[in-house]
Amino acid sequence: MIYRMNIVTAITGASGALYAQRFIHGLVAAGVQTHLVISPLGRRLLHDELGMESVDLGVLAGTDDHNISLYSYNDVGAKLASGSFLHDGMVIVPCSSNTLGAVAHGLGDNLIARAAAVTLKERRKLILCHREMPLSPIDVNNYKVLTDAGVILAPANPGFYLNPATVGEVVDFVAGKLLDLIGVPHTFDTRWDPKNIRPPAKSV
Ligand SMILES: Cc1cc2nc3c(=O)[nH]c(=O)nc-3n(C[C@H](O)[C@H](O)[C@H](O)COP(=O)(O)O)c2cc1C
């Protein structure tokens, strides 16, 4: 039997829908079985930033040939809500401060928070790609609580040392970093190599 990775992915109502789209492109390209939950505000961001009238899995995947299962945000009885469902980790991208706070305090009143709580209790990898600026003191406290609990905080904080020339390259830097953290191979350009530095873009 061929083993296929299972990754839980959540999209919440923080800016940066493109990060989610490119992260999911990477999962699908690697043949990962993707278990997707989107919060109501996450759906709004998909509309506002990607122009999606309704969730379009083909657009999120970059292909109609994908292994994405979409779960209802309110269904806290879905299999992702149980520790008996085996998976290889969970990534919330982008992650709002609201969901960050819910995860930090162990809430479970929606499938995203519940799946994250279960991922933590089962000691699986949980990665939050938080997006907010500036951080509130409460966000900073939540970072500490989450880090102490073993969560990886991977804020949407792209590096520019590869001299990106397009928004897509900036986005792919973050998406590729998330794929590295969850252990999915990808071809996004994220590696620093001092022997192969691209010249700076002349303008943006
Ligand atoms: C257009 C738009 C952009 C937003 N961007 C952010 C953001 O970058 N970070 C954040 O923490 N909240 C942001 N919010 C607020 C969250 O969507 C809001 O707190 C919501 O309750 C989050 O719910 P969720 O965590 O269930 O998705 C934004 C809201 C809208 C409408």
Image: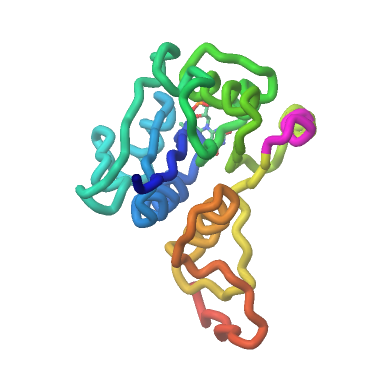
Comparing 109 with 2, the one in front is: 2
| Residue 16 image position (x, y, % from top left) | 48, 45
| Residue 34 image position (x, y, % from top left) | 38, 39
Is 148 a magenta residue? yes
Q: Residue at x 60, y 22 (%)?
A: 117
How is the rendered protein coloured?
A: rainbow
Which stretch did the figure color magenta?
145-151
| Residue 98 image position (x, y, % from top left) | 59, 25
Q: Residue at x 55, y 52 (%)?
A: 183
The quadrant in which residue 198 appears is bottom right
**Exactly how many numbered labels are in the figure?**
0
The quadrant in which residue 107 appears is top right
State whether residue 41 is above or below residue 81. below
Is 177 a magenta residue? no
Quarter of the image that includes the N terminus? top left
State whether residue 50 is above or below residue 143. below
Query: Is 150 placed left or right of 3 in the picture?
Result: right
| Residue 131 image position (x, y, % from top left) | 59, 42
